[in-house]
Image (cartoon, rainbow, N blue to C red):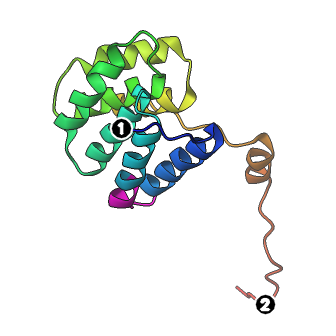
Amino acid sequence: MENIECPGSAVSGLIELITVGLTHEKLEEAALVLAAVRVLRPELKALDTFDAWIAIKRGSYLEGARLLRDLEADAGSKPLCKALYACCLFAVGDPSWHGIADGLIEEDADADAVGLVKALSGRYTPAPAPLEAAAESAAPMEVPNAQYLRA
């Protein structure tokens, strides 16, 4: 097969397009763009994360776990990859997801990954409201002039 030259910025744009497709439930379209990126960057192992994400979106958690297992075992694995792997294990009832989740929470390297596994474990704590909003809600409520009400 002939090598196709393509600037990194174009590949990055295509990867962003895959992400947008997946977040907007355009799974088939995202899979087609992913196939094109694989032709341009066949050595890019991180693309397997997108295959796993597509499998998860389709409800194939075992397939997602299989794809993510190899990526998660890699020392350079991204926290979000590990969090997705934990989600797949959670979905199929494998209790080993707890160890992955605890490791991500302890490591605290990626807020999205930590939030995801905290949500799985029921430890999710939403961000506190800004102080201004809290001060406004604590202020006494103005009551309209009710002179028209008679006892």
Residue 9 drawn at (x, y percent): 65, 42
Few, some or many residues within 10 Å of mark 1 (<14, 14–19, 20+): few
Q: Is 47 displayed left or right of 149 in the figure? A: left
Q: Is residue 26 magenta?
A: yes
Q: Quadrant of residue 55?
A: top left
**Three-letter residue code for mark 2:** Tyr
In the figure, 5 relative to 44: above or below? below
In the figure, 27 relative to 16: above or below? below
Q: Which residues are magenta?
A: 24-30
Few, some or many residues within 10 Å of mark 2 (<14, 14–19, 20+): few
Q: Residue at x 31, y 38 (%)?
A: 52
In the figure, 62 relative to 145: above or below? above
Q: Quadrant of the N terminus?
A: top left
Q: Nearer the viewer, residue 33 or 111?
A: 33
Q: Quadrant of the C terminus?
A: bottom right
Q: Quadrant of residue 120?
A: top left
Q: Residue at x 32, y 47 (%)?
A: 54
Residue 101 drawn at (x, y percent): 37, 20
Q: Is residue 77 magenta?
A: no
Residue 76 drawn at (x, y percent): 47, 13
**Three-letter residue code for mark 1:** Met
**Mark nearer the N terminus (2 vs 1):** 1
Mark 2 or 1, closer to the camera: 1
Q: Is 10 displayed left or right of 136 in the figure? A: left
Residue highlighted by disc 1:
1
Q: Quadrant of residue 134?
A: top right
Residue 122 drawn at (x, y percent): 37, 31
Q: Is 51 displayed left or right of 42 in the figure? A: left
**Numbered mark located on residue 148 in the image:** 2
The span from disc 2 to disc 1 (Cα, nearest Å) is: 86 Å
